[in-house]
Structures are given as structure tokens and as C-alpha cells.
Image (cartoon, helix red, strand yellow):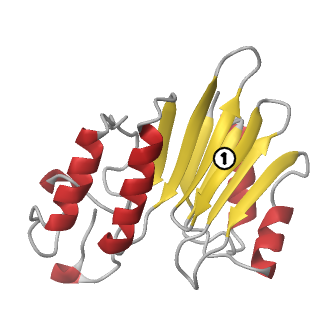
């Protein structure tokens, strides 16, 4: 099973549809999760048209220009049942043929650490059920000084400690990445530029 998660930072841009088609054509995923879509209402309907009709589609609307999650999957490749949704995550049960079921939690965590606490609590309860699980997405928090360049020096603030505690207490493992080490930039100039 191949799953792609893409923080597209806006699925309403004209460049979204061709980029999405290229990604699907190149990688041939069974499930795609689009994070930070920044879409709601009619804009979601437009994004739906960019996705093949033969694919399933589930969306969480954004709150203004923040957040938003779209889950789309190749029907017939697997059975996908959405069973929990909040503004920060979509939790799905995936069944593949004769293999067992597993849980996919697609996360776009709030930038407000107080809101993330709710996510950490809900996810911890789900993890404690013992099902095979993949929790992936944009957690909007870093845990190591190596994950930041520029701006104020990294410190182990309460929000960082809470995220680290969530990861270790639930036995979660960072699967690593390929590509650029830094995936976010504040787009400021000079000394004010921050990469994380």
C-alpha cells in the first residue's frame, strides 16, 4: 500500500491540479492525503474536480485560510472507512484484501499548542487501543535544534516538551524523510528568515 501525504499549502491555486496529477502518475499511490488545503465550501467542489472521479473523496473544511484536509483514495485498491474527524485529523480504518485492517491518522495539527493538546490526548486514546497504526502529516511542532535555522534560538519550551512526551509515551517512531531538511519558511528577508 502506497500512501502520499502532501502539505500542498493551498489546493485552490491553478498549479494544484496539474501538480496533483503528476504526483499520482509518478508515484501511483492508493491513498493521497492533502494537508493545509485552505479550502471550504465551493472551493472544495472545485478541488474535487481535479481528482479522478473513480477515486473516493473525503474533506475537512479549512477554518478561514488555515488548515483543511482532503483524503482521496483509489477505489477497489482498498476499503477505507473514515471513523473520526476533527479539524486537526482524519482517522481511517484501511482494509486490504485478505490482510488485516490498520489505522491511518492523517494529521494537520493546529499552530496553537493549546489546540494541539486536544489532538495529543485524542491520539493517545486511539493508540492505546493497540491497532496497527500510522500517524502522519504536519504536526506543526519540532523537537530538535537541528530542525530549525534562523530566528531566535531553539529552546525546549513547554509545547516542545509536550510533543516529545506525546511521541515517547505512545512509542511513536519518526520514519524520517527524503528531500529537503526544511519544509517550512516564514518568507522573511535577511536575519528574520526562519526555516523549520
Q: Quadrant of residue 189?
A: bottom left
Residue drawn at (56%, 83%) of the image:
65
Looking at the image, residue 3 sits to the left or right of residue 164; the answer is right
**How far across and how far down the image is residue 150, in percent?**
17, 70
Q: Report the residue marked by disc 1.
A: 32
Residue drawn at (24%, 72%) of the image:
194
Residue 25 appears in the picture as rendered: yes
How many circles with numbers are drawn on the protein? 1
Vertical side of 47 occupied by 85: above or below: above
**How far across and how far down the image is residue 119, in percent?**
42, 59
Secondary element at image label 1: strand
Q: Nearer the viewer, residue 174 or 29?
A: 174
User: Which quadrant holds the N terminus?
Assistant: top right
Residue drawn at (70%, 48%) of the image:
82
Q: Nearer the viewer, residue 109 or 81?
A: 81
Q: Quadrant of residue 151?
A: bottom left
Looking at the image, residue 101 sits to the left or right of residue 35; the answer is right
Mark 1 closeness class: few <14, some 14–19, many ≥20 residues within 10 Å: many
Q: Nearer the viewer, residue 23 or 113?
A: 113
Residue 23 appears in the picture as rendered: no
Residue drawn at (21%, 53%) of the image:
143
Q: Residue furthest right?
A: 53
User: Which quadrant holds the C terminus?
Assistant: bottom left
**How far across and how far down the image is residue 18, in percent?**
74, 59
**How far across and how far down the image is residue 47, in percent?**
77, 67
Amino acid at each position: 500500500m502506497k500512501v502520499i501525504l502532501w502539505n500542498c499549502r493551498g489546493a485552490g491555486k491553478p498549479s494544484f491540479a496539474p501538480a496533483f496529477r503528476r504526483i499520482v502518475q509518478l508515484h501511483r499511490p492508493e491513498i493521497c492525503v492533502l494537508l493545509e488545503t485552505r479550502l471550504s465550501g465551493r472551493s472544495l467542489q472545485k478541488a474535487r474536480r481535479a481528482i479522478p472521479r473513480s477515486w473516493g473523496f473525503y474533506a475537512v473544511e479549512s477554518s478561514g485560510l488555515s488548515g483543511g484536509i482532503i483524503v482521496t483514495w483509489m477505489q477497489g485498491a482498498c476499503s477505507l472507512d473514515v471513523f473520526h474527524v476533527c479539524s486537526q485529523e482524519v482517522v481511517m480504518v484501511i482494509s486490504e484484501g485478505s490482510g488485516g485492517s490498520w489505522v491511518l491518522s492523517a494529521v494537520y495539527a493546529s499552530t496553537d499548542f493549546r489546540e494541539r493538546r486536544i489532538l495529543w490526548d485524542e491520539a493517545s486514546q486511539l493508540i492505546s487501543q493497540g491497532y496497527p497504526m500510522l500517524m502522519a502529516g504536519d504536526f506543526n511542532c519540532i523537537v530538535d535544534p537541528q530542525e530549525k535555522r534562523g530566528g531566535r534560538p531553539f529552546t525546549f519550551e513547554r509545547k516542545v516538551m509536550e510533543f516529545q512526551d506525546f511521541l515517547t509515551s505512545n512509542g511513536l517512531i519518526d520514519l524520517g524523510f527524503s528531500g529537503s531538511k526544511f519544509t517550512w519558511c516564514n518568507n522573511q528577508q535577511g536575519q528574520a528568515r526562519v526555516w523549520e
